[in-house]
Image (cartoon, rainbow, N blue to C red):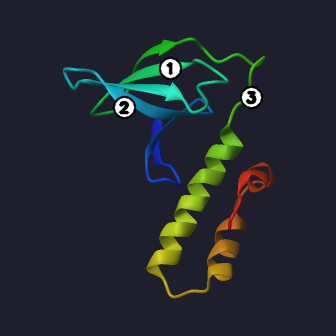
Amino acid sequence: MPKLIESTKERDVLMNNGYMYLFDALRSDGKLCFWRFRNKNECKARVHTTVDDIEIIKSIKEHTNITHDSEAPKIEGNIVVNRIKRCAAETAESASNVINEFLAGLSEAAKVGVIII
């Protein structure tokens, strides 16, 4: 099932089947959202969703394992980075405590993709 998350740059990202799509455009009647795979040079996959309930209406140019693998660890890492940023802004805890708390429950594959500066 598709799910919306917020990117580290506070933009909407659609997660579906282990891949991330970035918002591309809204149809002229405002009823459909067009999403493109996050790295459009690597893969031309796109999906169309309804605006209200983010139901996928159409998939265009499916992903192939030849060009890239699932991005599930990267998605998990992005979610944690956003939570760390939000928590750090809202609490008086030290940055290292906040980071360690969130990284403790993260898979090893996702930890590789998390870069905290």
State which tag comes first along the sequence, 1 or 2. 1
Q: Which mark is residue 46?
A: 1
Q: Secondary structure at mark 3?
A: loop
Residue at the extreme left: 29
Residue at the extreme top: 61
In which quadrant will I find the C terminus? bottom right
Residue placed under numbered mark 3 in the picture: 69
Q: Callout 3 environment at 10 Å: few (<14), some (14 to 19), or many (20+)?
A: few
In three-dimensional space, the C-alpha distance between marks 3 and 2, rounded to whole angstroms, equals 24 Å
State which tag comes first along the sequence, 1 or 3. 1
In three-dimensional space, the C-alpha distance between marks 1 and 3, rounded to whole angstroms, equals 16 Å
For the point 53% across and 60% down, the residue is: 82
Q: Is residue 49 above or below residue 5?
A: above
Amino acid type of the residue tagged 1 in the rendering? Arg
Residue placed under numbered mark 2 in the picture: 54
Residue 46 horizontal/vertical position (percent): 50, 20
Q: Quadrant of residue 107?
A: bottom right
Q: Is residue 96 above or below residue 58?
A: below
Foreground tag (3 vs 2): 3
Q: Secondary structure at mark 2?
A: loop
Q: Nearer the viewer, residue 45 or 5?
A: 45
